[in-house]
Image: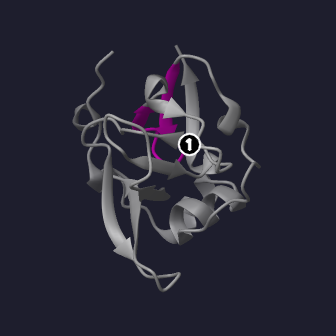
Amino acid sequence: MQVLASSLTSKEEWNLSKDQWKARLSPESYYILREEGTERAFSSQLNNEKRKGIFHCAGCDLPLFLSDKKYDSGTGWPSFWDPIQGSVDTKVDFKLIVPRTEYHCSRCGGHQGHVFNDGPLPTGKRYCNNGLALRFVPE
């Protein structure tokens, strides 16, 4: 199944105000997506999600990950080894002093999690995602 992130609505349509985002999201999802927060490890039901389907951004519904790219990293967060092409943007953050690569939804800018270089082949990447930043759509 090939899904292209670019086939959906533009970034400009998702340039919402703080109040509009707060009205759209739960307080917990707002904290993660708009304030770059992190949920507690092992708190997301999506960590154990094993069905076929697509994981979407909980902020704007952009498809981010296919279920066949998900794996159990043992970290307590839903983890993926490759996003849908064009669905995420990255930046370096220094919140824990040590630089980490943070990634966001490429359409609405919602914070998803961090990417590490300790994942499985073929990419060697671990996209460690907050479950509250995702919405799962079964096949």
Question: Seen in the image, is 53 located left or right of residue 91?
Answer: right
Residue 62 within the magenta-colored segment of the rendering: yes
Q: Nearer the viewer, residue 54 or 122?
A: 122
Looking at the image, residue 12 lies above or below residue 85: below
Q: Quadrant of the N terminus?
A: top left
Q: Nearer the viewer, residue 89 or 35?
A: 89
- Which residue: 31% across, 34% down? 122
Q: Nearer the viewer, residue 69 or 117?
A: 117
- At label 1, counting other C-alpha atoms closer than 10 Å, the crowd grade (few under 14, some 14-19, many 20 or more) is many
Q: Nearer the viewer, residue 41 or 103?
A: 41
Q: How many marks?
A: 1
Question: Seen in the image, is 137 located left or right of residue 44?
Answer: left
Circle 1 residue: 134
Q: Which quarter of the figure has residue 31?
A: bottom right
First to last magenta residue range: 53-65
Q: Position of residue 88 (x, y in %)?
A: 33, 49
**What residue type is disc 1 on?**
Leu
